[in-house]
Image (cartoon, rainbow, N blue to C red):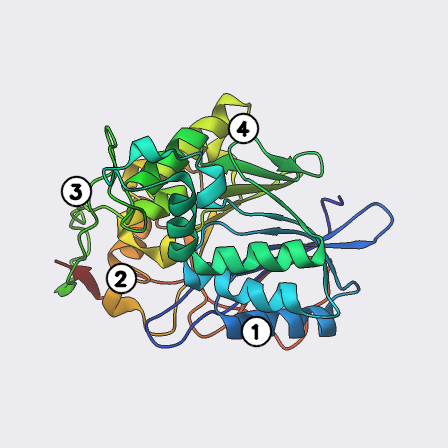
């Protein structure tokens, strides 16, 4: 793929305080043929926006690869519309199916009435949209592949950095979406946070809450790297701290450097529970992008504490948010009806607890 021609579009997803992810990557080969890669699909209406954009702006109606980071509704629902469109074709899907790819056995669960068949049914019932996508894919003859650390597309242009298979299984076994299980060293139970608001005091170090955890199922999220020469982008979905550290460890063990990423997507719509200063310290001076809802700050999406902390650690950091707009990174691909967005600045009020 050409390293000097691309466009990455982060769609605005959601309304009010409910956001999601949908990212379309436009790439071009040596003959200038366009190739599309889709990471997540947001809500169903987001899927319609993706279809409209592809039909109006792209030179192809074929999506080479669709990646679903994890089966939360705000990431997966729109894929139903995209896959069901009569005009758009898809090469293959990368999506982990809990009933298949976790390789669970009935002995892992406390309920002794569980059989292999009933376990599959319970998991499909818990992840209904993933099951629906699997059915659509089968009907349309689209292959579905699991996605674990090391899987790649087009000679490592796209590489899955995580999760590992053990981390994926651990996240699911700890999740409230699966039957109660025997799990050693599982993830702690998710505890919702009731956010308060406090004044930001400039030049005073911002306290960080290291004990906060994200939901266990978020640890199963794919972490994906896009590499186009020296332009490198990290997509994180809703990955938690353990998942991100594990993905970066894998990347560095295989010759990469976390500090080389040009663009880093902050996970889970900019939640402070999914990242910490230690992880931020592994990056160099990337541009950050947050896919977040229009009015999510009261629920920590994005976290103003996180944005201010990044700026505290690196005053030159550039942090962009989707909120009410689509956001693009592009090179040598014409765009229309766009305005330049200014990076986020330190907020006078930040989320506390």
Cα distance, mark 3 to mark 2?
A: 16 Å
Q: Position of residue 130 (x, y in %)?
A: 49, 55
Image point (15%, 62%), residue name: 194
Q: Which residue is mark 1?
A: 339
| Lower sequence index among marks 3 and 2 | 3
In percent of width and height, residue 107 lies at 31, 31
Mark 4 surroundings within 10 Å by alpha-carbon count, few (fewer than 14), some (14 through 19), many (20 or more): few
Camera-side residue of 42 and 6: 42
Please, what secondary structure does the residue beneath circle 2 have? Answer: loop
Q: Is residue 323 left or right of residue 179?
A: right
- Depth order, front residue of 125/156: 125
Discs 3, 1 touching: Cβ within 8 Å: no
Q: Residue furthest right?
A: 31
Question: Quadrant of the image for the N terminus?
Answer: top right
Q: CA distance from mark 1 to mark 2?
A: 26 Å
In the drawing, what numbered circle is on residue 256?
4
Depth-wise, is mark 3 or mark 1 nearer the camera? 3
Q: Which residue is mark 3?
A: 211
Disc 2: which residue = 300
Quarter of the image for the C terminus: give it: bottom left
Callout 4: helix, strand or loop? loop
Q: Are marks 1 and 2 in contact (CB under 8 Å)?
A: no
Disc 3 or 1, which lies upstream in sequence? Answer: 3
Q: Looking at the image, is mark 1 or mark 2 earlier in the sequence?
A: 2
Query: Which of the labelled discs sits on residue 193, or is there none?
Result: none
């Amino acid at each position: 793929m050409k390293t000097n021609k691309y466009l990455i579009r982060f769609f605005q997803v959601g309304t009010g305080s409910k956001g999601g992810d949908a990212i379309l990557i436009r790439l071009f080969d040596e003959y200038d043929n366009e190739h599309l890669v889709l990471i997540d699909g947001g809500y169903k209406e987001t899927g319609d926006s993706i279809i409209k954009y592809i039909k109006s702006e792209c030179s192809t109606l074929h999506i080479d690869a669709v990646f679903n980071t994890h089966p939360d509704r705000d990431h997966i629902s729109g894929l139903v519309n995209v896959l069901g469109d009569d005009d758009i074709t898809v090469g293959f899907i990368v999506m982990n199916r809990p009933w298949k790819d976790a390789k669970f056995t009935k002995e892992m669960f406390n309920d002794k009435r569980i059989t292999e068949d009933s376990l599959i049914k319970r998991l499909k019932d818990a992840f209904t949209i993933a099951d629906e996508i699997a059915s659509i894919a089968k009907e349309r003859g689209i292959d579905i592949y699991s996605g674990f650390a090391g899987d790649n597309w087009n000679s490592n242009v796209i590489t899955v950095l995580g999760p590992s298979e053990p981390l994926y299984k651990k996240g699911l076994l700890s999740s409230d979406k699966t039957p109660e299980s025997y799990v050693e060293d599982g993830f702690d139970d998710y505890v919702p946070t009731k956010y308060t608001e406090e004044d930001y005091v400039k030049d005073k170090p911002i306290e960080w809450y290291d004990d906060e955890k994200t939901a266990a199922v978020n640890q199963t999220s794919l972490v994906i790297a896009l590499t186009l020469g020296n332009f490198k982008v990290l997509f994180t979905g809703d990955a938690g701290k353990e998942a991100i550290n594990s993905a970066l460890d894998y990347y560095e063990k295989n010759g990469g450097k976390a500090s080389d990423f040009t663009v880093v997507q902050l996970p889970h719509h900019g939640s402070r529970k999914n990242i910490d200063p230690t992880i931020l310290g592994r990056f160099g001076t990337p541009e950050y992008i947050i896919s977040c809802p229009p009015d999510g700050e009261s629920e920590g999406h994005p976290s103003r504490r996180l944005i201010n902390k990044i700026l505290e650690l690196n005053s030159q950091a550039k942090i962009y948010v989707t909120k009410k707009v689509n956001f693009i990174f592009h090179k040598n691909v014409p765009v229309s009806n766009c305005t330049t967005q200014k990076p986020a600045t330190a907020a006078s009020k930040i989320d506390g607890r």
